[in-house]
Every structure is written in C-alpha cells, then in structure tokens.
Image (tube, rainbow, N blue to C red):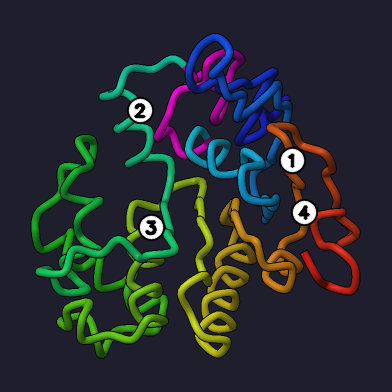
C-alpha cells in the first residue's frame, strides 16, 4: 500500500487557555496524495493559515497526528522540523522572502547550503541553482538583486529556490497575492508545469480565480474542513466566482 504524501488525523491547534482559548483547528482530517494540486480556501480567521503552518512544519499541533511520507512529524523537535522543512518542502510566500543583499542566484543557493545531507561542492551547488533559475525563465537575471527585479520575477526566484532541493511537496502561501494580473498568470502557469512534471502542490489562496487552477479545493471554516471538492463547486468559491 502506498502512503499518501500528507495524512492528518484529528488535528487540533489551541492558542491560549481557559475562557481565552482560541481553537484555530478543531479536529481536521485530510489526505493529500503524491502528485495532487490542492488549494486551501477560507475566510479570515478560518484556520487556513494555521493549517498551512502545520503542514509546513513551522508549528506544532496541540493534538492529533501529521504524517508526511509515512512519518509522524507532528511532535518532532525544532531541529528535526527544520531538517524536514529543508529536505521535504519547498516554500513560496506572498511576500517572496528573498534576502535583499543576495543576488537571485545567491537566494536560490541558500537551501542547498543549509542541507546537511547534501555534501556537494560550491560549483555543484551553483550549477544546480543556475538550472533551477533557468527552469523558471530567469537565466538572464540571476545576478540581479531583488530590488532590481519586478514582483513577478522575484516570485519566480522564490519558486526556483523552492525547487532547488527537489522537495516532494511545494507549499504556496498566496503566491499571487502581491502580483498584477499578468504576473499572476505567469506564476500559475509555472505551478501548472511543475504539477504536470509530478510535483505535489498545496496552495493557500483567497482568490477563486486562482483556486480554480487546482484540481482540488479544501474549504476551511471555524477550524474545520467544511468541504473537499474536485469539481469546482466548493462553497468557498461563492456565487458567480465571488468569495
């Protein structure tokens, strides 16, 4: 039997105690298989960001289990979670999260340098980063710093960085949130290409038009998954495309 890439069972996350306790997640169950492209949607305060943080091994759940590739990662130490993040997950953020003093090439090389299991030379690391930038169409801009790049180009650098260690999963948190329409289309096209090549993509978005590009839409509300749709009829999509 092949394990799903992600399997979450009865996951909860509680902030605070007593009467002040906030149940950000209230018992979530979900499986995501290798090769899926899933979107997570929900209103502000629904729990989607908390779920994303736990999926990305950036936070621990209060209770429940989270299996990634068959391994329970829900109670790992901070150092162990850091290793999982670097080896198993490629992150794409709304705000790009690029280091301003490094070139595009330098930013993309960072995950390689922090990979304790990848004992390669600097030349090999650079060659891999160059190949990753070429895959997102930025071979001519690799020596430019973030402030010399457009928003769409910065997000492509972020995607190249997410890909450079060949992680099994890409987590995209509002990847088009800071982009104009043209750049948004370019980024979604890149995500589609990655998905077609076998990448598993989990994307948080509040934009119905962006969510429609995923093959599956998880609608989160009040800390629970209210619907799990593969036909584009998620209640999170709203009426006539409005959230």
Answer with the quarter of the image where residue 86 lies.
top left
Q: Is residue 106 magenta?
A: no
> Which badge, 1 or 3, is on the more N-terminal residue?
3
Q: Residues within 10 Å of mark 3 (few under 14, many from 20)?
A: many
Numbered tag placed on residue 221 in the rendering: 1
**Labels in figure, total:** 4
Q: Which residue is mark 4?
A: 216
| Region rendered in magenta | 55-74
> Which badge, 1 or 4, is on the more N-terminal residue?
4
Q: Nearer the viewer, mark 1 or mark 4?
A: 1
Task: State the image coordinates of residue 5 (x, y, percent, origin top left).
Answer: 61, 36
Residue shown at 60% from the left, 30% from the top: 24
Between 223 and 113, the one nearer to me in the picture: 223
Pointers 3 and 2 in contact (C-beta within 8 Å): no
Residue 112 is left or right of residue 84, and the answer is left
Residue 204 is left or right of residue 153, and the answer is right
SS assignment at label 1: strand
Pointers 1 and 3 in contact (C-beta within 8 Å): no
Q: Which residue is mark 3?
A: 162
Numbered tag placed on residue 47 in the rendering: none
> Which badge, 4 or 2, is on the more N-terminal residue?
2
Q: Which residue is mark 2?
A: 81
Answer with the quarter of the image where residue 83 lies.
top left
Q: Tell me the quadrant of the picture where the C terminus can be found.
A: bottom right
Pointers 4 and 3 in contact (C-beta within 8 Å): no
Residue 98 is left or right of residue 191, and the answer is left
Residue 76 is left or right of residue 3, and the answer is left
Residue shown at 25% from the left, 51% from the top: 111
Q: Is residue 64 magenta?
A: yes
């Amino acid at each position: 039997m092949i394990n799903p890439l992600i399997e979450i069972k009865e996951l909860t996350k509680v902030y605070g105690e007593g009467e002040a306790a906030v149940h950000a997640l209230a018992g979530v169950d979900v499986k995501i298989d290798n090769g899926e492209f899933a979107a997570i949607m929900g209103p502000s305060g629904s729990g989607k960001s908390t779920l994303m943080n736990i999926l990305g091994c950036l936070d621990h759940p209060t209770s429940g289990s989270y299996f990634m590739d068959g391994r329970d990662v829900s109670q790992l130490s901070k150092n162990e979670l850091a290793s999982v993040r670097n080896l198993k997950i490629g992150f794409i953020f709304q705000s790009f999260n690029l280091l301003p003093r490094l070139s595009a090439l330098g930013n993309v090389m960072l995950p390689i340098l922090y990979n304790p299991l990848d004992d390669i030379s600097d030349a090999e690391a650079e060659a891999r980063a160059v190949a990753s930038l070429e895959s997102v169409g930025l071979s001519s801009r690799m020596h430019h710093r973030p402030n010399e790049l457009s928003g769409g180009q910065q997000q492509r650098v972020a995607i190249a960085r997410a890909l450079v260690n060949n992680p099994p999963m890409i987590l995209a948190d509002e990847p088009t949130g800071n982009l104009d329409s043209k750049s948004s289309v370019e980024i979604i096209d890149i995500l589609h290409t990655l998905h077609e090549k076998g990448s598993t993509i989990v994307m948080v978005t509040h934009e119905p038009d962006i969510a429609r590009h995923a093959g599956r839409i998880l609608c989160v509300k009040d800390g629970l998954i209210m619907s799990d749709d593969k036909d584009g009829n998620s209640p999170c999509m709203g009426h006539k495309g409005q959230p």
